[in-house]
Every structure is written in C-alpha cells, then in structure tokens.
Amino acid sequence: MHIEIQRNADISITKQIYHSILDHIRSNLLEENLQLPSVRELSKQLGVSLVTVVKAYQKLEQEGFITSVQGKGTFIRKTKMEETERKERTSSYDWQLSVQDYLPRSQFARFHQVPEKIHLSSSMIDPGLLPNRYLEQEIHRMLSENPKVLSQYGEIQGDKALRQAMVEYLQRMDLTTSPDNILVTSGSQQGIDLIARTFVGPGDVVVMEAPTYPGAIDVFRGRSATILTVPVDSDGMRVDLLQNLCDKYKPKIIYTVPTFHNPTGAIMPTKRRRQILEIAKNTQCIVIEDDPCSEIYFERKPPASMKSLDKDGHVIYLKGLSKVLAPGCRIGILAASGSIFKRLLAAKANTDLGSPLLTQKAIIPFITSKRMIDHLKKLRTALKIRRDLVLEILSQHSPEEVSWFIPKGGLNVWLTLPSWLNTDHLLLEAKKEQITFLPGSACYPTDQENHHLRISFSYMNEQQLEQGVKTICNILQLAIDSKIKQDSSPYF
C-alpha cells in the first residue's frame, strides 16, 4: 500500500493518511482481514509522528473500516462495505500482497459494470435507444469495400476524416476548431488520463468540484496531485470560492463539468464560465472542460461551451461519443491548441499509438448525416420521459426528509438525504434487492459527504426504473423510521 504524503498541503497529514487508506479500501485494493502496518511501522515509513498515525487509525476504526486486535495488530474490516463483493482468498496468490503498487484509488470501476438486475449506478444509455443496427450495417459495408482497414494502423492523432466530421459536429454546438487541433481518444476517460500524465505530478494542485465525476478523481489521485475542492450550487462551481483558492494556491489544473454537471445536473451560466476563464488567465492555469452529454437537454440548449469562449488556449475540451452513440466504439475527442496540444499528442503516442481505426471509420457516416440529428432528438425525448418518471416516483414515494435537484438535461438525478444517513450502508440494502445506485462518497475527492446518492435514469426501461426507484424510496423510509424510533426510545 503506497501512501503519498504532501507536507505542504493544506490538508493535515492525519487526514491524508486516513483518506489514502479509505480510498484503498473503497476501491477494493485492500482485502478483507489484511493486516495493516503497525502504528510504529507506518510512522517510520512515512516519516511522521506516532500520534499522527494513531489518529488516522482511530478515525478509520470508529467508522468501522478497520479493527484492532490486542496483541495481534490492525486489520481491514469491510463489514460496512460491500460484503457481497468479497472474493475467496487463494493461498497460492498470497505472495502478491507483498508486491508494492502505486494505485491510490479506483472507485468508479466498481460501480460501472455490476451484476445487479436493476442498474442505476452508471450513466450509460439503454442499448435499445442507440443506433446499433445502423452501425452494424455500416461496419459490414465498410469491411466489404475496404477489408484492409483491419490490417492498417490509424493516425496517432486520429483518422483525419473523423476529425473533420467532429469539427462540423462541434460547429453545430457553436464551438469552432480545426482538425489539426483535435485528438481522437479512447473515450473521455483517456482524455483525462492523457492530461494528467502530461501535466500533473506529485504535489501539483488540481482544483475540482465537490461533488464531481468519480473517474476524474481516480485519475488525479493516481498522479499524487494535491486536490482542492470547490462546492457546487445550482449554477455549478462556486466562482467566489474558486477565486480565493486560486489566489492562495496557484493551481495547475481546474477540472469542471459545466454542462449538466455530473453528478448534480447543474448548468453553469455563461457569466460564470467567463469568470472561470478570467481566473485561469490570471493564474496561468489549464481548464479541463469535460462535456459528456450537452446534447441531452430537455428544455433548451445549454450555454455555449467554455472552449468556444477561450481566446488564449487555456481550455482543453473533452467530448465523448460513447454515451450518446456507441459505447462499444469508445470514441472521444480532445480539443486544445498550441504547445499544450502538441504535448498531449506526444502523450497519446506513448500510450497506445492511436485509437482503433475500425471504430473511427464506422461512426463517420452516421455523425455526418441527418441520422445523427434525428437520433439525438429521439434520444432526448426518450430520456426526458424516463427522467420525468423518476421525478414523479420520488415526489410520490420518497420520505419528506429527502430532496433532489431537477436536472434539465443529462442522465442523472442527485438526491440529498439527512446528514446522519450513510448511502454506503443503504447500498448494501439495495443490493439485497438486486438494485444498485452510486453512493455520494465516490464523488468527493477529499472530505466525503456520505448522505447523497446518484440515480442514473438512462439505462433501465420504465418498468425497471419504477421498480428500482420505489424500492430505494422504501429503503430510505425504513432507515429514517428506524432512526426516529431509536431516538424516541427511553433506552437511548
């Protein structure tokens, strides 16, 4: 278990140790009953005081993540985590526990593909709403006309025809760029990873929203960045608090999801987007604008992207096509300019020498035709119906102590529960009913808030959504009733 200590960070060393071990546990990187280093061993390894480690261990034990046995040591205890995910230990593999790794966190993957019958934890779109048959026919046609495509490498930067098609696609979203400034990636996640690999090293300051997209947290934590957070309100990242942080810490990266924010669904107005650009200009930092689904709006088009307002090359824009078109193709694009783009292109070359050519070629005819426009219209209609269904069920069946943000686009609904409820625990109850959601703790880079959860309404059909959301409401009601009964008992 590798723990990176940043002695000049604003976060105490005790908190850093606590969060590092907790992230390892929540990411299933530490197995049940694994013995942790003793307080003395860990303090020596990290070069910190015994008291500092003791406080971190005490907090973890109070929250039920570890247990101390007198005379034996301190051990991982996952009874508050997902016991159903435990795997049997194989004695022949025990030696692997001695191999040092440098993975501080990988939480998002745990919620992306899960075996539960009603899958509400990941922002994927129902395959029945995607143009699978057309893409299948297009792949057959392309292979019959040009079978050599399977034996050819594509350009590292991405197929030129696709880059040109994406220029036209982005122009419909009021974003002007050129094929020379576009890099084709294996989904937006690779775009985040390329940026982090290129520009973020141990101790570099990255500012993120709280809450935010868990996959981005995993990447930046993997680079040993110092992550500072800015709360999100109904208009996205709080610019007043961002300004204060930037004045004090001079970040290298500001990561934001300004359009249909993940997980809350907030939309950042144009004024606030301009303010963030001005802050980036004054501090000479990079803004990562992650745009997973601005096409999925239910009322009116969202404001123009931050990249379209950028005149000085501060914004790196990420757009994924996986969600709205073809998850199996794993196509995304990164738009940047100047030497920043050249360095990202070099990073792409080092990573995989270019994304698969077949899938790039397969989607070009679709995104350049009217079919894409019609597909997005139908997709918005179908997803709005599912969003409205979830909101109606919540209004009718959720406890009055529960509130939620009404998204005007995107794929998720963000719920806030009473502060004493822990959605990590509630998830265990949901899984007994073969239902899953994303607990809020996965969406916080530093101090987790455990009383939120995200429901994705885009993957399940209406019948499954109704069953799943009603069951979650029932679980919430039982938890609240139990607390009220406990508080009113004369024995407490």
Image (cartoon, rainbow, N blue to C red):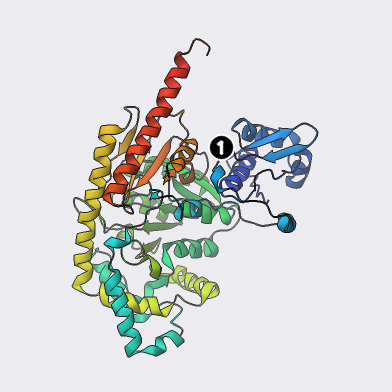
Neighbour tally class for label 1: few under 14, some 14-19, many 20 plus, Cα within 10 Å = some
| Relative to 294, 253 lies left or right | right
State the count of labels. 1
Identify the residue at the far right of this view.
71
- 482, above or below 42, in the image: above
Please name the residue shown 19% across and 66% down the image: 374
Identify the residue at the far top of this view.
490
Q: Which of 129 and 226 is in front in this view?
A: 129
Please name the residue shown 28% across and 43% down the image: 390
Query: Picture coordinates of residue 63 (x, y %)?
Result: 59, 32
- Res. 189 image quadrant: bottom left
Query: Picture coordinates of residue 215 (x, y %)?
Result: 47, 54
- Res. 371 image quadrant: bottom left
Query: Picture coordinates of residue 400 (x, y %)?
Result: 31, 27
- 489, above or below 335, in the image: above
Looking at the image, can residue 244 be seen?
Answer: no
| Relative to 276, 169 lies left or right | left
The amino acid on which the numbered mark 1 sits, given as a three-letter code, is Lys
Q: Name the residue under label 1.
A: 80
Query: Picture coordinates of residue 230 (x, y %)?
Result: 44, 42
**Circle 1 SS class:** loop
